[in-house]
């Protein structure tokens, strides 16, 4: 049974070649699928990193692995592979594909609210 926000087998098989090869020295790394499921849980739920469920591993591990994959181009490789597959199956048009960032919260000041202390400054100018 696949839990909410977790990768199905066909999805995992599509992106697995993008992941770095396993290390041969040092501490055995956590299962990359487990880490990636934790990343998806965070991205889909909107929760803070510290709230990642324990079944995905320590939140710091999930966060740092995500940042390393993003920095090293692994995430971009995954997106490209999934885009190509969806395009091949006729589900998307690559000319119109984009990531929606409308759920990103802006600061109150960005929405026109007065900044802290602005009222006091106006009063002293009079």
Image: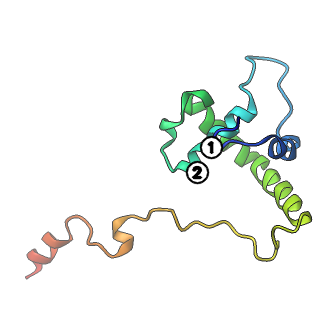
User: Compared to 67, does 102 lie above or below?
Assistant: below
The reply to whether residue 79 is visible in this rendering is yes
Q: Which of marks 1 and 2 is nearer the N terminus?
A: 1
The reply to whether residue 57 is visible in this rendering is no
Residue 87: image quadrant is bottom right
**Label 1 SS:** loop
* Residue at (27% x, 68% y) in the render: 115
* Residue at (69% x, 32% y) in the render: 34
Residue identified by numbered label 2 = 44
Residue identified by numbered label 1 = 4
User: Compared to 9, does 125 lie above or below?
Assistant: below
Q: Alpha-carbon distance for marks 1 and 2? A: 9 Å
Q: Which colour scheme is used?
A: rainbow
The percent position of residue 70, horizontal first and vertical second, equals: 71, 48
Residue 6 lies left or right of residue 88; in this view the side is left
**How many numbered circles are shown?**
2
The percent position of residue 65, horizontal first and vertical second, equals: 67, 37
Q: State if disc 2 and disc 1 touch (CB < 8 Å).
A: yes
* Residue at (15% x, 77% y) in the render: 122
* Residue at (64% x, 45% y) in the render: 5
Residue 18 lies left or right of residue 48; in this view the side is right
**Image quadrant where one finds the N terminus:** top right
**Label 2 SS:** helix
Q: Which residue is at the far front?
A: 1
Residue 65 lies left or right of residue 43; in this view the side is right
Of the pair 66 and 72, the residue shown nearer to us:
66
Of the pair 116 and 49, the residue shown nearer to us:
49
| Circle 1 or circle 2, nearest the eye | 1
Q: Residues within 10 Å of mark 1 (few under 14, many from 20)?
A: few
Residue 50 lies left or right of residue 12; in this view the side is left
The percent position of residue 15, horizontal first and vertical second, equals: 83, 46
């Amino acid at each position: 049974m696949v839990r909410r926000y977790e990768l199905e087998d066909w999805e995992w098989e599509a992106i697995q070649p993008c992941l770095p090869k396993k290390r041969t020295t040092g501490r055995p790394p956590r299962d990359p699928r487990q880490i990636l499921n934790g990343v998806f849980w965070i991205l889909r739920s909107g929760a803070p990193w510290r709230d990642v469920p324990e079944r995905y591993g320590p939140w710091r591990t999930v966060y740092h692995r995500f940042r390393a994959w993003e920095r090293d181009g692994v995430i971009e490789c995954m997106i490209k592979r999934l885009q190509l597959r969806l395009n091949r199956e006729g589900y998307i048009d690559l000319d119109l594909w984009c990531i929606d960032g409308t759920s990103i919260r802006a600061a109150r000041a960005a929405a026109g609210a007065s900044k802290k202390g602005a009222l006091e400054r106006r009063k002293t100018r009079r």
